[in-house]
Image (spheres, rainbow, N blue to C red):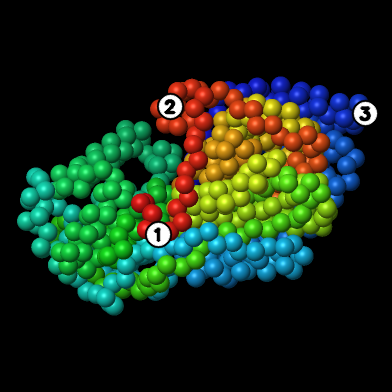
Amino acid sequence: MFRFYLQPRGPSMKTLRTLAAFTLIAILPFSAATAQGRGGGRGGRGGDAGAPAFPTDDPIIKHIWALGMDSSQVWNLAQPFLDSIGPRLHGTPGIKSAHDWIVGIYGKWGISAKNEQYGTWMGWKRGISYAYLTKPRLHVLEATALAMSAPTKGEVTGSVAIFPDVADAAAFQRWLPSVRGKFVAISPAQPTCRPNDEWQSTALPETFQKMDEQRTRDLAAFSARLDRAGFPGAGRARNRPLGDALTKAGAAGVLVGNWNRGWGVDVISQSFSETIAVVDLSCEDYGLVYRLADRNQNPELKVRVDAEYQGDVPVYNTIATIPGEKANEYVLLSAHFDSWDAGTGATDNGTGTLTMLEAMRILKTVYPRPKRTIIVGHWSGEEWGLNGSRAWAADHPEVVKGLHAQFNQDNGTGRVINMSGAGLLTSASYIGNWFAHLPSTFMSQVNLSFPGTPATGGTDNASFDCYGAPGFGLGSLGWDYGTYTHHTNRDTFDKIIFDELKGNATLTAMLAYLASEDPVFMPRTKRVLPSGRGNAGGPPGDWQECVKALRAWADNNR
Ligand SMILES: [Zn+2]
């Protein structure tokens, strides 16, 4: 889960460089200060590859660089983590194995780590699933059960019914008994499975426009079908009653087409029903089945979904700690640990997890006795509403109070290119100072904005920003995250850009070190927020309130 938050226009990069240089000059001889700041613009690579300009002679910064960039372990950590342990869906045996694996890794490095239970969730175990078209011809369908889907009753054979175009809810109720034993298709078919960028680069402009307008009309018309049938709204509010109605009427299963507008990519996230099997078909296969049914060519499917509900199971955050001299002040590394499970959650949020894990390895070697205690939080339940981080912040008020800086990363594999001051007025002088100590490579690639605004949702720094604590997000370059990997069946190991991942781990280790060394604790002076930036519709300056964590499946309303 993630969304970008808009920044009001802050000081320009030039201003920030000046600020950084100014801060640096206050600390260092002039000759050292003038060495910094080479390199390209936003997202660029500064200096010579592999040989950055270091603005200071700080041996720890140089040692972090050597360990992170020249003897990186991110590939060796990522491979067993993503290929062997695999996806980490909240409440599954998979995420429990992953928690145990990462605690074991920290143990080998001599870092104390533990799994802290904060609640329970509905246990679920994915089994095998498959779907064939058996009539009018044999075809193996590219099919994936949604996460937490109910199982089918073994292998089920049935025909296909398209959600009907009825006048009203009464007409739908009259139609409903006809679904007994059938698979009900509840998504519109796509007119094309080619991504828009191909249409735009290849088609005549008017051809693309015609297709795009037709598609928009078709989608709206299908949504209106559901409204008229008595299932208005969207998401869970619409789908839950629909799932219940289809279950009660004896449907064999539900077919959806969650195409994400890229080649071969579907979003596979939470099923809307725990009473009926819900299966996603690829864009191509959903369209095939839909057209056959729509044109009365009588498609028949053979479908099997195995899945097991396991009752309430404990859920955890993994917390690892390098104790500091100032025992009551903290630097927090942060990335959610859970994922969706059709891919392996490689970029959401395997890469954030690996960034923090590798940063801890580096810090333990280079900086084993920090000034402030360095904690890493591998949160679970983020995809269900920041559950793990919200619970942990509520359970550890001493850390929220003593939090000097949190660094959270959760938007894919790309190099970090932006960071904001989370709405804290004095954050510029702290962050500016850290960046003045970074090698040119990092200094030139990150666009800083101050004071920025606090995160209000989307990912785990929001769970700390709501307390007015300094929770900073490390914003990454996209690499088509939104289309190809975010919550999709294609979020796998091969999508990781390892050079950028190792840079992010190195940068994070440097920021943690520099934050730990700051002589003065980060003040909590909040900016006045523009209207609508805090609580929705609230007056200017209204800071987002903290939200109570979901600690049990019974509280889940998603
Ligand atoms: Zn995420």
Work out whether 153 lies above or below 390.
below
- Is 41 left or right of 202, judged from the image as shown? right
Q: Is residue 289 left or right of residue 17?
A: left
* For residue 477, side relative to residue 121 (left or right): right
Q: Give the amino acid at mark 2.
A: Gly
Name which residue type carries label 1. Answer: Trp
Q: Nearer the viewer, residue 388 or 410?
A: 388
Of the two numbered discs 2 and 3 on the same chain, state the one appearing first in sequence: 3
112 shown above or below 386: below
| Residue name at image x 60 percent, y 27 percent | 526
Q: Dot 3: few (<14), some (14–19), or many (≥20) neighbours within 10 Å? A: few
To which residue does mark 2 refer? 538
- Residue 29, labelled with which disc? 3
What's the residue type where badge 3 is placed? Pro
Rendered location of residue 357, percent (x, y): 68, 57
Q: Are marks 3 and 1 in contact (CB under 8 Å)?
A: no
Q: CA distance from mark 3 to mark 1?
A: 58 Å
